[in-house]
Image: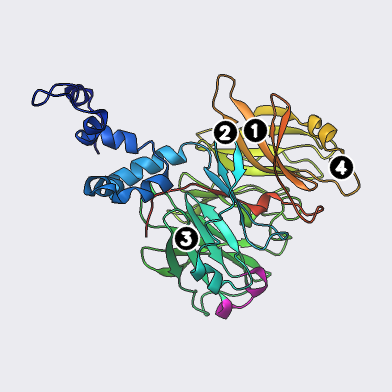
Amino acid sequence: MVSCSWQKMAKCHRHVNGGLISPAEKVLGNEDLLYEILLLVASKSLLRHQCVSRQWGSLISDPCFVRLHTQKVTSVASSAIFLVGECTKSPIYLSKMENEYQIVETNPLDMEEKLLNRAKSGLFIRHSCNGLICIACPVDKLYSIESFWCQVYNPCSRCFASNPRPCSNQVSGYLAAMNLAFNPLESDHFKIIGIWEDMIKFSFFIYSSKTNSWKDTGVSLDARYYTYNFGDYGESQYFFRNGVFLNGNLHWVSNTKSFLCFDTIGVRFEPMPCTPVSSDGRNIRYFGAYGGRLHLIENKHNQAMIFNVMEMRNDYSEWYVKSKVDINFVTKIYPRVMGEYGYLNILSLMWVKDEQQKMKLMLSVPGKIISCDVDEETVTELFDVQPERSYYKSYHVYDHFESLFKF
């Protein structure tokens, strides 16, 4: 690893051959300083400027640099979001700019002819993890292993990895969910956790890019007493589609059952604290990771606009209430939220880094996607949704980090 040496930087100010060194020459002549500066540059800009010189290309492609840059990127909120709903033919791409998400007209997935040719009926994002997205067969094709196909893709570096289908004698039933597990700070390889259901049990299989093969983990859950649906927190008991990868583990939550923590390295379930559950179940509105910690948003069934924002302690000992949020001010701006066809879905959560650590929520309300500043009680409209009664739910959202990783 190259570290910035202030002694070396000071030498750049000295006279050379009787003349002064220009600021640009100071940077180019000091690799340590250039290294530190490039670490602050966005991934897409770095990839565009690899060809500036051999020196730049060598630094930007260096595995140590890629890991350091990735560490800086993943230590904050996601730099972009893909929204994939029934109301859109292709994903909507939102990029974060100055603590706010803005819609980007040029969707990185729209430019990929290989993906479009493979998925003629549309792009089906199944999961995202640390800069990679998993694109696979549509829901109506999940009952046949012969129709299975899957690709892992980095939209920033535009690199693909095609993954083989499991052997037909390995799996039975239908594919309930696929979750990515990828930690670029520890390995260049990723895993896909596939969950198959045969009405009796959920079986867990792992694909490893290192071996390019699927393996039966031998881990299963009884499915006979569980209702299951693809996604929304209010419709299913285990939300396998909404797995959150953190600390080498995949996490799933439930409105009625125990939460699950699956160790993707040890291939086993680990203990995970749950939030209290009442007789009518939990009412989970959001589950995700931010700043290296798990976050969960719940509310009571009779308090539609008041939420508990909860955070998991680093030692996994308990969930605690980080903040109590009242967003009734949103209903004053959008009264139809509480109407006959009203709804309000939480899509994303982030904290603005300032003196007060302000919280922002991305919400889907009738006809619009909005961002609300909880502390200031202000709303920013991000874009309109057509047709007007269309909406997005939490499982339509895929966080994305723009990374330099290449397969």
Q: CA distance from mark 4 to mark 2?
A: 27 Å
Residue 261 magenta? no
Label whose residue precedes the other's in the sequence (1 or 3): 3
Q: Residue at x 31, y 34 (%)?
A: 36
Choose the circle earlier in sequence order: 4 or 2. 2
Quickly name the residue at label 3: 153
Q: Quadrant of residue 381?
A: top right
**Total marks drawn?**
4
Give SS at disc 1: strand
Q: Residues within 10 Å of mark 4 (few under 14, many from 20)?
A: some
Residue 99's disc is 2
Q: Which residue is mark 4?
A: 336
Question: Can you see residue 186?
Answer: no
Residue 230's image quarter?
bottom right
Amino acid type at mark 4: Arg
The amino acid at mark 3 is Tyr
Instruction: Find the distance from the CA under tag 1 to the CA under tag 3.
Output: 29 Å
- Mark 2, Cα crowd under 10 Å, few <14 / some 14-19 / many 20+, is few
Q: Is residue 264 above or below residue 135?
A: above
Q: Which residues are magenta?
A: 138-147
Q: Which residue is mark 1?
A: 360
Which of pointers 4 and 1 lies earlier in the amino acid sequence?
4
User: Farthest top residue?
Assistant: 355
Q: Nearer the viewer, residue 135 or 91?
A: 91
